[in-house]
Image: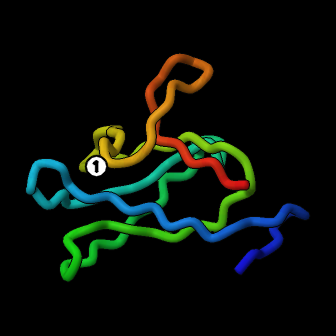
Amino acid sequence: MKSVIDGEARIPITFSYVSENNRKPSSVQVCGSFDKWQVRHPLTYDPLYSKWSITLKVKKGTHFYKYIVDGQWVISNSEKTMKDPSGYINNFIAIG
């Protein structure tokens, strides 16, 4: 379901993080270009699936993001990655 914020349509996108070292982090956040890297969105842990997730409403376009796991900025190796214009490797999504 689309919503409109600030005159622009936004689409619900679920970000999910699964620990790659079989250790449950104490906190996971996601931060990205979809809100100018200004907000750290906390993910909720689901013990049934052993993953962290959050659904955010995001504008159409290509967006870079990273997870912040126990205070460390990381990418998920199970998601698409790309260099941003500054040369940093990030995860990304393209919403059409």
| Residue at 48% in and 53% down | 40
Query: Relative to 73, is 1 on the left or the right?
Result: right
Up the image or down, 36 lies above or below 8; here it is above
Disc 1 marks which amino acid?
Val
Q: Which quarter of the figure is the C terminus placed in?
A: bottom right
Write the residue at 57% across / 48% down.
93
Question: To which quarter of the image does residue 4 belong?
Answer: bottom right
Residue 28, quarter of the rendered image: bottom left
Q: Quadrant of residue 54?
A: bottom left
- Residue at image location 70% in from the left, 80% down from the top: 1
* 30 left or right, relative to 94: left
Residue 46 lies, in percent from the top left, at 27, 77
Q: Position of residue 30 (x, y in %)?
A: 44, 53
* Residue marked by disc 1: 69
Q: Is residue 45 above or below residue 27?
A: below
Identified at 74% across, 54% down, the residue is 60
Given residues 66 and 70, the one toward you in this image is: 66
